[in-house]
Amino acid sequence: MLYKTIIGLEIHIEPNTNSKMFCSCPQNHFGAKPNSQTCPICLGLPGALPIANKEAINKTIKLGLALGSDISKISKFYRKHYFYPDLPKSFQTSQKDNPFCIGGELMGKKINHIHLEEDAGKLIHQDGNSLIDFNRSGCALIEMVTEPVFHNVEEVISFTKELQLIARYLDISNADMEKGTMRLEANISLSTDHGLQSTAKLPDYKVELKNINSFKFLEKALIAEIERQTIALDNSEKLVQETRGYDENTKTTFSQRTKADSHDYRYFVEPDLAEIKLENSKFEILNSKLPELPEQKRKRFAEQYKISSDYINILVSDFDRANYFEVAVKLDPSLTKSIADLMINKQFDKKYAAASLVRKLKEITNVEYSSQSDLEEAIREVLYESPDIVTSYKNGKGQVIGFLIGQVQKKLGGKGNPNMVNLKLTEELTNKNF
């Protein structure tokens, strides 16, 4: 039987604040000696009182504004109760009603809300023992909750990668999954309702995949869980609401615990923190500081610089690299395509300052050699006349480029600038439209 995959995401991002959510301990815990960055507040000791981190609140709102969320003018923190060894207070200070950001969308996928909370500690399992590092306990943590609007693995991967890039463009977090500053959880269920996706009836269960720390891990875990649920439903088994992990060795998911509903957490308003009132002027200030976002930059690069979409995606995937490209192009717009090629294929942006790169290109394009138009025409003719050689090159035989260079020089009577011939020939061969 065919089933409709329904996936909702919970994405956690640690903002790059100086201190934790409710105390002055350092927020950056990566590589620190275990339990060296703690205090009475983040350890939940009696009498310790929290103070909300203004910087973390601003970064949460900044993300919401970038994604078109409505910003709550009055927001509150709640106590979310559950017992687990890495939670020293036996409750997590989080949000429930009126989170900072409500609604919004990314890549056409609707966002339910974005809220701010504190992180738990980290459990380390080794040699049959479980150790706890509380350095992460109390760290500020932005959580985005999407609607259950994903229907295949590819959509999920694209969405999470774009969100990671946006976090970096906004400078709210490096969102590095290897360092744990971005973590993913996916809620998955399969539906037999084959109506329109917008009106499909949601199943009465969902399985949450936790502790996902890479995009590849996320892809494998989703595929494994969808396969498990499909087999279970085919065999008329009853699927239950639970939390599961993914085992890389067996390529399967495994049950961790049954999943609680909202009422099980016994939420109530945090009595030690006042409600937070936000003014419109605050939104306007933060909105005015938003940078050009990745998708906006991709569209502008395509219109302004007329370079291939592959080049654009590579340049835009790194905020600093995209800026380097624009600085270099402003120095000599006639070298736009050559600058992009040298950055991507030769990594020249890692070797030279922008001005040095442009000077080097001008040396390469010295007018004593054949004109650029003659060079490009010669390259087109050679490639048209040598389809078998071109196919060999695209199949990985890079050494054949020497033959093509020789043919181009032959047509130019030996007057082609060697560096420019190589550069332009490589550029044309890597053009996916060729």
Image (cartoon, rainbow, N blue to C red):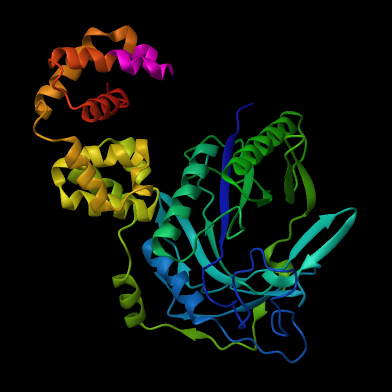
Counting the numbered discs, the total is: 0
Give the quarter of the figure containing the C terminus. top left
Residue 193 x %, y %: 57, 37
Q: Is residue 64 left or right of residue 390?
A: right
Q: Residue at x 18, y 27 (%)?
A: 417
Quadrant assignment, res 123: bottom right
Q: Does the magenta run of residues contain 391? A: yes
Indicate left or right for 173 with 219 as reference: left
> Which of 188 and 167 lies nearest the eye of the viewer?
167
Name the spot of residue 89 as percent of width and height, x first. Answer: 76, 78
The quarter of the displayed image where residue 258 is located: bottom right
Residue farthest to the right, as pictured:
128
* Image quadrant assignment for residue 409: top left
Vertical order, 214 against 227 (above or below): below
Res 152 visible: no
Task: Find residue 271 and report its horizontal and vertical position in percent.
Answer: 65, 88
**Is 201 part of what is drawn in magenta?**
no
Pinpoint residue 110: horizontal percent, then vertical percent. Answer: 45, 54
Q: Quick check: 251 above or below 111? A: above
Is residue 350 shown left or right of residue 308? right
**Image height of 426 relative to 218, above or below:** above
| Span of residues in magenta | 390-403
Residue 434 or 257: which is nearer the viewer? Answer: 434
Q: Nearer the viewer, residue 403 or 19?
A: 403
Give the overall secondary structure of the magenta segment. Answer: helix
Q: Which residue occupies 58% across, 38% down?
A: 5
Q: Quadrant of the N terminus?
A: top right
Give the residue drawn at x 13%, y 42%: 334
Does any portion of residue 167 appear in the rendered image?
Answer: yes
